[in-house]
Image (spheres, helix red, strand yellow):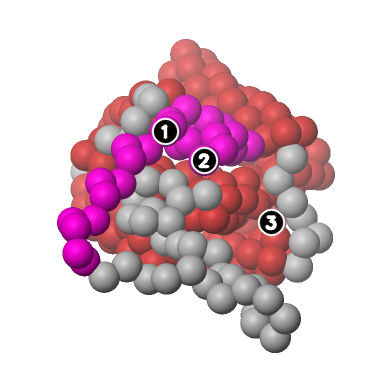
Amino acid sequence: MAELHSSNPAFTRSGFGQTRSPVPPPPPGSWQPGPWPQGPGFPPAPPAPPRGGLTFDDVVMHTLGVFAVMLVGAGVGWYLSPDSPSIALGAAVAALALSLVISFRSRISPPLVVLFAALEGLFVGGVSRFYESAFSGIVLQALLGTALVFVAMLAAYRSGRLRATPRMARIITGTLLGVVLLGITDLVVRAVSGSHLPIINDASPLGILFSVAVLAVASLQFILDFDYIERAVANGAPREEAWRAAFGLLVGFVWVYLELLRLLSKLRQ
């Protein structure tokens, strides 16, 4: 089996493609299928499905489970944020650190992915409550917008108009790191001086253009996710890689959702 190299930075150390253990021979006397008939008039032999390999159903089920954990965490974060706003900030820092651990481990750890989803939910719930208090109805708009972005990216990928490339991966990784660093800098500036970075929060033309550009790049994260999932299934990746696929999709959804919240809040000001 050829080794699979993913363009998605969240999947670069997945360990997928390592040599799998040989399948033990069948017991003597057991029935085995004969060779596929060949020759004129016979259709070509179908490709043999990988034994115990990753399937799209595995990815869907694991993704639904991870999102369910995040939604529970988001409910808790929403409820606690008015009285304990520091919970969302602490969860954000912990989720960021844990995401780096998950991304750079050679093997995926399901407990870490579940813990990341819970922490991400606490953060998203607190942030959503803050925006909803300031702009009524903005959370529903951002959720619908995120779903539309996902569907649009899936349609673009399936049609072949957008494909994952190493250059795209570098742009997305650099943008994500830049947004994280800007966010941390903004928090430090707020804590020290009570001010903020204008380009992130102000509803100026430059601030709106910045949010639109970041949202466009964040949306391309889904293309990297789709590319990884499709090739992993085609190459018979181990089934536990469904956890890594769910982790990547969760990161993409949260990033697009937060950028939509920021952009919509600027447009309402």
Residue in front for this viewpoint, 169 or 203:
169
Q: Which residues are magenta?
A: 1-30
Q: Label 2: which residue?
A: 1
Question: For the residues marked 2 and 1, what is the alpha-carbon distance in whole angstroms?
Answer: 7 Å
Give the vertical position of 240 relative to 62 (above or below): above
Q: Amino acid under label 2?
A: Met
- In the displayed image of the protein, which residue is found farthest to the bottom? 41
**Image side of residue 25 versus residue 256, left or right:** left
Question: For the residues marked 3 and 2, what is the alpha-carbon distance in whole angstroms?
Answer: 50 Å
Q: Label 3: which residue?
A: 267
Q: Residue at x 77, y 62 (%)?
A: 160
Q: Amino acid under label 3?
A: Leu
- In the displayed image of the protein, which residue is found farthest to the front? 29
Residue 72: give x, y in percent of width and height: 24, 57
**Image side of residue 125 versus residue 181, left or right:** left
Label 2 with label 1: CB-CB less than 8 Å: yes
The quadrant in which residue 217 appears is top right
Please say whether residue 254 is visible from this viewpoint.
no
Mark earlier in primary sequence (2, 1): 2
Helix, strand or loop at label 1? It is loop
- 9 magenta-colored: yes
Q: Label 1: which residue?
A: 19
Residue 147: give x, y in percent of width and height: 55, 67
Mark earlier in primary sequence (1, 3): 1
Q: Residue at x 21, y 48 (%)?
A: 80
Question: For the residues marked 1 and 3, what is the alpha-carbon distance in whole angstroms?
Answer: 52 Å
Q: Residue at x 56, y 22 (%)?
A: 181
Tag shown at residue 41: none
**Image side of residue 98 versus residue 161, left or right:** left
Label 2 crowd (10 A; few <14 / some 14-19 / many >=20)? few
